[in-house]
Image (cartoon, helix red, strand yellow):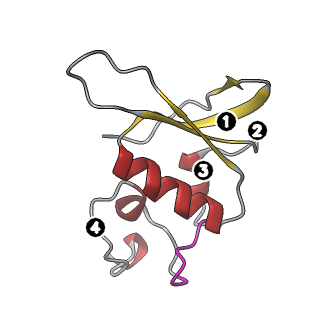
Amino acid sequence: MSMPIKHLTGKIGDKLLTFVEKEASEERKNFLKGLLEFNGFEVIIEENTAKEGENTSYIVAVTDLIFNPVIWVYDRNLKTPEGNIVNEDYWMQINQDFKPQYYER
């Protein structure tokens, strides 16, 4: 799993959105929804149509058309509910260790 480089926009229903992830699992959808809403974004979720035998996936999007996950993570603009700055490992759900920061290595 890697962070998207492109800034993807589109529509769900009649709302113009920035797509955060287009194939998120249930766990990932819940994680992103909670984190993004905590940071003040309006989050829109749409269930992808699953074929028989496939797991359900979700589209996670925000109504802020200039939101780009790469920029927001690396500019250190997102915070966790505990007040920590979101780093790439936290965003990607690799771990929740905020120390050491990349600039301390």
Q: Which residue is mark 3?
A: 71
The disc, 4 or 1, on the residue closer to the chain's N-terminal end is 1
Say which residue appears at 70% left-offset and 56% top-offset: 41
Please give the residue where the numbered disc 1 appears in the rendered image: 18
Q: Would residue 100 be found to the left or right of residue 62 on screen?
A: left
Q: Amino acid at mark 1?
A: Thr
Sequence-first disc among 2 and 1: 1
- Give the residues drawn in magenta, as a range: 77-83
The answer to whether any part of residue 90 appears in the image is yes
For marks 2 and 4, the one nearer the N-term is: 2
Residue 65 badge? 2
Cα–Cα gap, marks 3 and 1:
13 Å
The residue identified by callout 4 is 95
Relative to 5, say whether 29 is above or below.
below
Q: Nearer the viewer, mark 3 or mark 2?
A: 2
Q: Mark 3 or mark 4: which is in front?
A: 4
**Disc 2 residue type?**
Leu
Three-letter amino acid code of the residue under disc 3: Ile
Image depth: mark 3 or mark 1 in front: 1
Q: Position of residue 79 (x, y in %)?
A: 57, 72
